[in-house]
Image: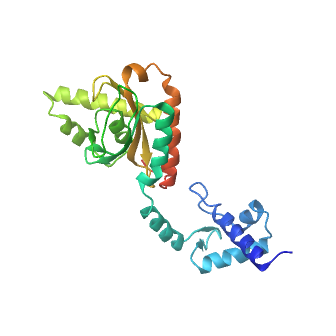
Amino acid sequence: MTTKTDNSFGSLEKAIRILSLFDSETPEVSAQEISERLNTPLSTTYNYLKVFVRNEILTKDPHTSKFRLGLKLFKLGILASENISLLEVARPYLESIAGRCQETVALTVIDGLEVLCVDTIESSRPVRYIIKRGGKLPLHAGAPGKAVLAFTDRVSLRDVLEREGPAKADEDASRRTEALTRELASIRSKGYSESHSEVVPGFTALAVPIRDHTGCAIASLSIIGFAQSLEKEDQQPLIHMLKEAATEISAKLGYSRKGC
């Protein structure tokens, strides 16, 4: 026997399924498309849509008669993003990666012309890289910083190079700019950065960007280990592990492949 409560839950689930049809690639959907994709009678679909429009959950374009997400959802989205903490979202991924690779794993966020370590899990190996929460690394040197620098437009390359130190001549400045520009382009192409004895001699780092809802990198997730042990391993599984985690973290922060 179907109860009123069962019907209510069924209606709620249907409403959620309708809203789930909207994404960055499908910002507008017609009533007919909704009806067909959810195998729901068109008349029933219109009843749901009327309620959504009346409550500003959806809006209807008067020219195309298609529906798109409304102002109320936009406000709720902002509220949700303000309550999602990068640390809270990323921590389980740090724990998982550290457990699988047995190397130091770090989460760093952009802080001016540096990256700031906001969370880390230290390797248990006898020879290991140690970075404490609050520790800083340069943007222009080392995998964690470059993973952010390659995927953000919030910092100018000129400011970064000036922070590195004055060039001896215009030719040196030009050469440094060209070299860093090429390296950042390579990082964007690969989707990750790597460094070898660049910040601390004897240590290798692999890092990937974490993006927010604007599409720009706000942080990086990295594995850092003693070069002799880390470079002996096949690095591709480690890179895949980092990319997979960063993709999921970024999605939870609202990233949808737009922006930087």
How is the protein colored in the picture?
rainbow
* Residue 100 x, y percent position in the rendering: 51, 34
Viewer can see residue 258: no
* Residue 129 x, y percent position in the rendering: 33, 31
Give the residue drawn at x 55%, y 71%.
Answer: 70
| Relative side of 204 to 163, left or right | right
| Relative side of 161 to 46, left or right | left
Q: Residue furthest right?
A: 1
Q: Quadrant of residue 160?
A: top left
* Residue 56 x, y percent position in the rendering: 56, 76
| Relative side of 167 to 50, left or right | left
State the residue in front, 39 or 145.
145
Please say if 207 is above or below 213: above
Q: Quadrant of residue 206?
A: top left
Give the residue drawn at x 40%, y 49%.
Answer: 216
* Residue 242 x, y percent position in the rendering: 48, 37
Quadrant position of the N terminus in the picture: bottom right
State the residue in front, 189 or 101.
101
Give the residue drawn at x 53%, y 47%.
Answer: 248
Viewer can see residue 82: yes
Q: Quadrant of residue 196?
A: top left
